[in-house]
Amino acid sequence: MRKPLRQVAALVAVGPWILSCSANPVGPVSATLSTDTVSYLAVLGAPLGAGHEYSFSVIATFTNRSANTVSLSRCTEATPYPIYGVEVVGHDTTSAFDPGWGCPAGLWYRVPAGATRVDTLPLRGPWGGDGVTGRAQGIFDGSFRLVYQLYGDGDVHDIVRSNKFSVSRAPQGR
C-alpha cells in the first residue's frame, strides 16, 4: 500500500517540473500589452438609469515575446478582438469600463512566438448599476490598465497588463 502513495507523491513533486518543460508555457510568459495613447476622453452616450453611458476606443498592441504560441480567448467567432479586462490602478474597486464577460469557452486567437497582434477595443460603461437608485457602478475617471489572460492548452497561464492610461469623461453639454 505504501508504494502507490510514494508514486503519487513523486508525481506531485516532479509533475510541475515536467509540465514546465512542455511546449506550452505554464509560468510567466514574456509578453507586452500597450495602448495607443496614455490619455482618453470618454464621450457621452445614451441615457442609462440615473446617468449616461460613456465610450471610447483603445488600440491595443499585444506582442508575444516568448518562445511558445500563446492563446487569447475570444467571446464568439464574430468578436474581432480578444476578451479583455479593465482594472483601476491603485484601488481595489471596479472599473465602469470592465465588461465582465459571459462567453462560451474554447474560442481563441493564437499568437505565435515573436508575433504582434493589434486590436481596436471598444470600451464603454457602465456595465452595472444599482437596481434601486439607477446609479452606475464602477469608476469612470482615473488611471486604468488593460488586462489580457494568456492561455496554453486552455489553461490560464499568465496575465499581461498594459501601461497605465487615464480616462476622463467629456463634459455634458446643455
Image (spheres, rainbow, N blue to C red):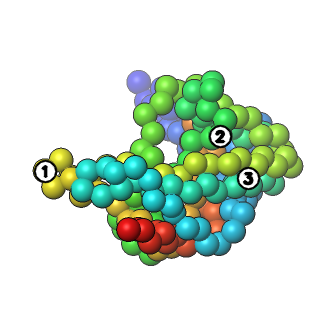
The residue shown at (61%, 54%) is 57
Q: Which residue has dot 2 on it?
A: 81
Q: Name the image quarter holding the C terminus.
A: bottom left
Q: Which residue has dot 1 on it?
A: 132
- Measured as percent of width and height from the top left, residue 40 is found at 59, 68
User: Badge 1: few (under 14), some or many (20 or more) residues near its Cα, within 10 Å?
Assistant: few
Q: What element carries label 1?
A: loop
Mark 2 is on which residue type?
Answer: Tyr
Residue that lies at the very extreme toward the front in this rendered image: 174
Ranked by sequence position, the earlier of labels 3 and 2 is 3
The residue shown at (32%, 50%) is 48
Give the alpha-carbon distance from disc 1 to disc 3, as whole Å.
40 Å
Q: What element carries label 3?
A: strand
Q: Is mark 2 on a helix, strand or loop?
A: loop
**Residue 138 versus residue 104 in the image, above or below:** below
- Measured as percent of width and height from the top left, residue 112 is found at 82, 40
- Measured as percent of width and height from the top left, residue 103 is found at 48, 30
Q: Which residue has dot 3 on it?
A: 62
Give the alpha-carbon distance from disc 1 to disc 2, as whole Å.
34 Å
Q: Is mark 1 in CB contact (under 8 Å) with mark 2? A: no
Q: Depth check: 112 or 57 in front?
A: 57
Question: Count of labels shown?
Answer: 3
Give the alpha-carbon distance from disc 3 to disc 2, as whole Å.
11 Å
